[in-house]
Image (cartoon, helix red, strand yellow):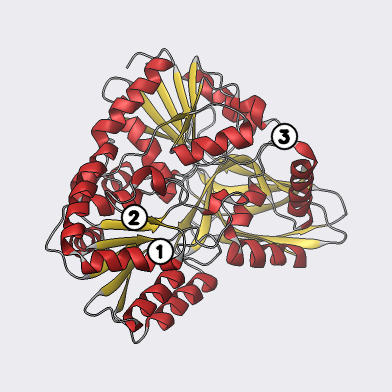
């Protein structure tokens, strides 16, 4: 059986990417499995980082395309799994599944239609260029965003009321490509000569008129007429529309409100429910997500929780430590580090002695995110709060092993009914902490109640007084702490790879797929 698994965001190597690649790892034991994305990823690096054996999995890189082009791609497989967040296109494979990390609202009702109308027009007004043909996914190389290009690339540029310039760097990625032709609306514009060292050539294109434009970049291939060449012919970097509207877009949605920027670029199609119905099954990563699929889409789904490497975490000699793990980034959907630091400071002021709060997580580029991290550091000064940034896995495993209590606060102060996306949809770090014998004291919203059995393997809280109160109980009662830690270790095994493989096979059998 030929299996195709699509994930646009593979290069980010995040939790969703591990979820999709774990499906590939499982099925590759008996089937021919291809993982499809738009950005090249080193199979060995991603396998090592996500603790997966991907040796039998084939990685394919295809250009970004239209919904129709992606839909055609599914026809080549007996089983196709769309595991890419916010990517919707019809499935044409004999069997197919849509893996949902969290749903986007379907276009139903006047409010939803108005929101879509605003999003589409805002994107046009802010002059966000769109790659509509021949471009692969964006990569971060040397601090700059780079897109690899095929032999022919087309970029759609929204209209403006007056002339402006389009600026970017262009480089060859293929020795047989020494020059490229630029065309604006099908008319020859200029020719770019590439140096032999594959360095970027600065390009400046003047755009006139009030209508939308199409910029085409064609690689001129020498000495290989009729031959199939490599998929990457050129590379493009630092694409910028030199217009006040686009500068406003970059300020708002690339620096301050990245999540909204992603939504602006990935507005779901109007026919989202019709697209969902082309899949034989919808898989949710948690009961929380399954509930919102029913609310947003009025469609049934089945739960396939992500696998957690619980065997990589072991309890060690426990110290008087509270741990929280989560990336440091700004925005109302962040991990609420400031909330936890304030709660811990209050406990210290109330007499908590000898205990430390450890905050561990990756850092995020950008001044707004760095300023947020500095605010956390400033609030922690003078108290036993230790901040661990970008720690390697071995050190993270040590922090889990040494800590007695685990805190999690994502979503605190947010409205779960209005913006459920701001809450933890599952809770992988909570399971990791439980596997290491940390007693979880986590917010009782999102996916956390599915993992934590309140009063048995941890505590669920909704107010800061409850967070502190449950923590005080564990601090004052070491026997209760040890009893709950033992239960947490046992319950964490429900999310190991063995259970994941078993659940995946059950779901496939329900679809009529032999595993």
Does residue 54 appear in this view?
Answer: yes
Measured from the top left, where is residue 73 in percent x and y? 54, 25
Nearest to the observer: residue 26 or residue 146? 26
Q: Disc 3 on helix, strand or loop?
A: loop
**Residue 30 falls left or right of residue 177:** left
Going from N to C along the chain, the mark reached first, 1 or 3, is 3
Q: Which mark is residue 459?
A: 2
What residue is pinned by disc 3?
A: 270
Quadrant where the C terminus sits is top left
Q: Residue at x 63, y 56 (%)?
A: 260
Does residue 68 appear in this view?
Answer: no
Q: Which mark is residue 140?
A: none
Task: Tell me: residue 373, above or below residue 487.
Answer: below
Going from N to C along the chain, the mark reached first, 3 or 2, is 3
Q: Residue at x 55, y 65 (%)?
A: 331
Q: Residue at x 44, y 20 (%)?
A: 79
Give the class, few, some or many, for how many residues have Cα within 10 Å of label 1's Cα (few <14, many ≥20): some
Quadrant where the N terminus sits is top left
Give the class, few, some or many, for how many residues have Cα within 10 Å of label 3's Cα (few <14, many ≥20): few
Q: Residue at x 54, y 22 (%)?
A: 279
**Residue 274 falls left or right of residue 314:** right
Q: Which mark is residue 466?
A: 1
The Cα atoms of the two marked residues, 1 and 2, are separated by: 9 Å
Residue sitting at the far left: 317
The Cα atoms of the two marked residues, 1 and 3, are separated by: 43 Å
**Residue 17 falls left or right of residue 256:** left
Measured from the top left, where is residue 470 in percent x and y? 33, 63
**Residue 486 falls left or right of residue 287:** left
Q: Disc 1 on helix, strand or loop?
A: helix
How many numbered badges does the structure rendering display? 3
Check whether the beta carbons of the residues at disc 1 and disc 2 lie within 8 A of each other.
yes
């Amino acid at each position: 059986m030929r299996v195709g698994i699509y994930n646009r965001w593979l290069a980010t190597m995040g939790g969703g990417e591990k979820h999709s690649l774990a499906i590939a790892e499982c099925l590759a034991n008996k089937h021919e499995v291809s993982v499809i994305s738009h950005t090249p990823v080193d199979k060995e690096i991603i396998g090592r980082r996500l603790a997966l054996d991907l040796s039998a999995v084939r990685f394919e890189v295809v250009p970004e395309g239209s919904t129709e082009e992606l839909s055609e791609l599914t026809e080549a497989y007996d089983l196709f799994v769309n595991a890419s967040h916010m990517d919707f296109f019809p499935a044409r494979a004999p069997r197919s599944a849509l893996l949902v990390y969290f749903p986007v609202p379907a276009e139903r009702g006047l409010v939803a239609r108005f929101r879509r109308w605003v999003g589409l027009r805002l994107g046009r007004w802010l002059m966000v260029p769109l790659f509509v043909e021949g471009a692969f996914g964006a990569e971060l190389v040397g601090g700059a965003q780079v897109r690899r290009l095929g032999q022919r690339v087309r970029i759609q540029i929204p209209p403006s009321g007056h002339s402006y310039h389009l600026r970017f760097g262009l480089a060859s990625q293929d020795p047989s490509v020494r020059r490229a032709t630029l065309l604006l609306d099908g008319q020859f514009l200029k020719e770019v000569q590439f140096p032999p060292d594959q360095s970027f050539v600065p390009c400046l294109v003047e755009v006139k008129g009030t209508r939308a434009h199409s910029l085409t970049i064609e690689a001129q291939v020498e000495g290989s007429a009729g031959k199939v060449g490599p998929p990457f012919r050129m590379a493009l970097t630092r694409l910028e529309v030199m217009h006040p509207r686009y500068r406003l877009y970059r300020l708002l949605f690339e620096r301050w409100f990245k999540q909204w920027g992603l939504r602006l670029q990935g507005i779901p199609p109007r026919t989202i429910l019709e697209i969902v119905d082309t899949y034989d099954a919808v898989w949710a990563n948690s009961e929380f997500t399954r509930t919102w699929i029913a609310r947003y889409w009025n469609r049934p789904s089945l739960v396939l929780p992500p696998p957690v490497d619980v065997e990589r975490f072991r309890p060690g000699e426990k110290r008087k430590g509270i741990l929280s793990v989560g990336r440091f980034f700004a925005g109302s959907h962040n991990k609420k580090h400031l909330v936890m630091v304030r709660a811990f400071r209050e406990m210290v002021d109330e007499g908590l002695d000898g205990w430390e709060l450890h905050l561990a997580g990756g850092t995020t580029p950008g001044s707004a995110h760095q300023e947020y991290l500095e605010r956390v550091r400033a609030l922690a000064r003078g108290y036993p709060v230790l901040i661990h940034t970008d720690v390697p896995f071995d050190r993270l495993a040590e922090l889990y092993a040494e800590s007695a209590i685990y805190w999690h606060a994502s979503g605190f102060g947010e409205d779960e009914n209005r913006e459920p996306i701001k809450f933890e949809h599952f809770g992988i770090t909570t399971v990791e902490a439980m596997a290491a014998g940390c007693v979880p004291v986590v917010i009782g919203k999102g996916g956390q109640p599915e993992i934590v059995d309140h009063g048995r393997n941890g505590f669920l809280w909704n107010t800061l007084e409850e967070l502190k109160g449950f923590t005080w109980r564990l601090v004052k009662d070491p026997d209760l702490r040890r009893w709950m830690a033992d239960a947490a270790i046992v319950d964490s095994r429900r999310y190991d790879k063995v259970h994941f493989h078993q659940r995946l096979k059950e779901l496939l059998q329900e679809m009529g797929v032999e595993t």
